[in-house]
Amino acid sequence: SQTIHQWPATLVQPVGSPLSLECTVEGTSNPNLYWYRQAAGRGLQLLFYSVGIGQISSEVPQNLSASRPQDRQFILSSKKLLLSDSGFYLCAWAVGQGNIQYFGAGTRLSVL
Amino acid sequence: DQQVKQNSPSLSVQEGRISILNCDYTNSMFDYFLWYKKYPAEGPTFLISISSIKDKNEDGRFTVFLNKSAKHLSLHIVPSQPGDSAVYFCAASDSGAGSYQLTFGKGTKLSVIP
């Protein structure tokens, strides 16, 4: 069966520090991968998605970036965090012609 | 421009009664619709979906209805249980777009009162 791992679960970072969140998927090949953010009291905002290794599409211009160094690995990064980067970050995957996305447990990021 | 709207931020229902969560969309290219359930500090869990070729899909206590002419869908939970208390997100996709992106509503917080 397929599983998705996302870590860390909680992260507190000072403004201006770098960020690296990692997501890996097991049990499937060539998944579509997604990064979402849920800000307090708001819905899910798609940040990046990838349909293959090295292919990244950005939905929202910001100081975040994403990379997909391996088929089942998706990384969200920032060189310098802003206060507005605080939120709940979610990784998701989907395969084939299906539109169902499956989510990881999320990372709660607090930028102070 | 919000393409998927959940106009009720919250809903309270008595245990055993029916919960009806509503969702409206504006993009006529959307042809696949999903409901997700989310508990605090967890990722959303897929609940049920419906293709635009259908107007109803049922899975146990959960039924989704789609009214394409009104661009409206609803999720019915019968009977409601306290464990159903969560935030419910409606999502939609245009499968012809090729990237399998989902557009989410802002969610409705359901509270089932024992």
Image (tube, coloured by chain):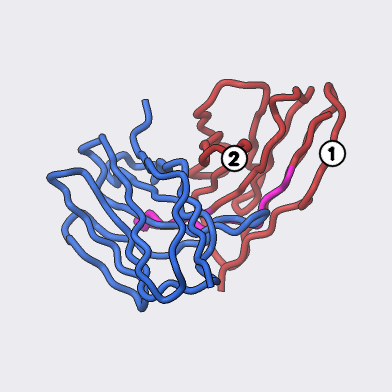
Marks 1 and 2 sit apart, C-alpha to C-alpha, by 16 Å
Identify the colour of chain A in the image.
red
- Residue matched to label 2: A38
Say what amino acid the circle numbered 2 marks: Gln
Please state the chain letter of the residue tagged with numbered disc 2 in the rendered image: A
The residue positioned 43% from the left and 63% from the top of the image is B13
Q: Farthest left residue?
A: B69
Element type where label 2 sits in the image: strand
Residue B39 picture location, percent across and down: 60, 59
Q: Residue at x 34, y 46 (%)?
A: B92
Which chain is rendered blue in the image? B
Mark 1 = which residue? A12
Magenta stretch bounds: A93-108
Where in the figure is residue A62, as x and y percent of width and height? 62, 21
Q: Is residue A107 magenta?
A: yes
Quadrant including the C terminus of chain A: top right
Residues at marks 1 and 2 on the same chain: yes
Q: At x 61% / y 36%, what residue is drawn?
A: A39
- Residue type marked 1: Val
Instruction: Give B85 or A29, whichever is nearer the viewer.
Output: B85
- Would residue A32 be counted in the magenta stretch? no
SS assignment at label 1: strand
Can I make out residue A53 in this image? Answer: yes
